[in-house]
Image (cartoon, grey):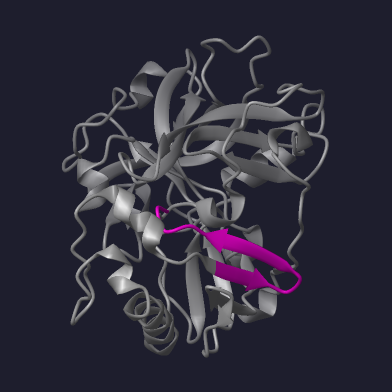
Amino acid sequence: MLLQPKVLLLPAVFVLHVGSCFGQNEIAPGIETARIYGNIYTYAYYFVDLLVGTPPQRTSVILDTGSRVCAFTCTHCRKCGKHKDHAFDLQASNTSNWTQCGAGCAGSCERDHCSYFQHYTEGSAIGGWWFDDLVSLGDIVGNDQPNHPVRGRMGCHRIETNLFYTQEANGMLGVGPSFGSQGTSVTPLLQQLYKDRKHIREHIFSICLAEWGGMLAVGGFNVSYHTGPMQWIKMLTSSSSGMGYYNVHLTGMQVDGKPVLASFGSAIIDSGTTYTYMGSMAYNALKGAIMTYCKGHNCCGGDCPQSTCWNLASAKVLDNFPDVQVIFGNVKTTWVPSA
């Protein structure tokens, strides 16, 4: 992803983290759900399972609100790492078809196959060939009401670089907004699920993220997952912006209740990363506010650094650092130091 000026990239876990995602009525008519796996520290991402093909083959994919491509490792990949699930074998599915070159191809033509290439902010990239097949959310294990398959367009990796090569998950499930994909013939998998009006009642998806795992729902949301009242933040999704992401207006930040003197602009909510990226002016202002607080509180129990990194005797020392309040209009959320 390319960041626009004055745009802050936030991990979606920051906004959606609720501590527990096991509420009542997890499966309801018109809503399909899938269990989310992973966490911030061990995996550094969250992922879901997909069942692809006939007979179905399981593949694990990172849940990413910052992109729209659904693609994963397939057999005969010339440069792919070893992942959690077996590589998808397209020849073993009797409902699969390669996407042909020509009018229906959104990418370039490679060896008579329609190809794709996707580059991500942190430097990793994936590339391969498009294909069509049946796909459903989640795994059949422990699911009393299996989700219904739809026909969707997905990508078979032929090359993975950097983190995509070393990660455990087999691929990526992009659930970004569809307006940024106008002019191409690839319909995001989320939009294909929305077309299944028999089983999906609303054009809504929700992500509940806990410290470990969570729940993805397509067709609605479940208020019983939340530990407190739900709060809503207006989303900036004007197609005229040309960004194609879920954007919100970040009003400001506070450290120990005192405003951070910086302009933050808009923020991209991105479930595919556990990092927060911001412009240098906003970053230096936030860092300076934390430093000022710690200098007045015995260096927060550590060694006050001259540059960026702190040396702490244990994780318990983090309790000495101040909370950071992040404000979206009338909604105020809190970054705790251990996060």
- Indicate the position of residue 177 as horizontal and vertical percent values: 63, 59
Instruction: Report the front residue among 158 and 262.
Output: 262
Q: In the rendered view, would you say 29 is above or below 191? A: above
Residue appearing at x 75%, y 38% in the figure: 221
For the residue pair 131 and 122, the one nearer the viewer reads as 122
Quarter that holds the C terminus: bottom left
Q: Determine whether, in the image, residue 285 is placed left or right of residue 232.
A: left
Instruction: Classify residue 290 by image quadrant.
Output: bottom left
Question: Taking the image as drawn, is residue 58 in sight?
Answer: yes
Residue shown at 42% from the left, 51% from the top: 101
**What is the span of residues highlighted in magenta in the rendered image?**
325-339
Give the left or right position of residue 123, taking residue 256 as reference: left
Q: Main secondary structure of the magenta part?
A: strand
Task: Decide which of 279, 147 is in the foreground and name it.
Answer: 279
Q: Position of residue 331 (x, y in %)?
A: 72, 66
**Quadrant assignment for the N terminus:** bottom left
What residue is at 67 percent from the left and 66 percent from the top? Answer: 332
Q: Is any atom of residue 117 visible in this view?
A: no
Residue 48 counted in the magenta span: no
Q: Residue at x 58, y 69 (%)?
A: 326
137 relative to 183, above or below: above
In the rendered image, residue 338 lying in the magenta stretch gets the answer yes
Residue 156 versus residue 107 in the image, above or below = above
Q: Position of residue 198 (x, y in %)?
A: 82, 27
- Closer-to-camera residue (320/204): 320
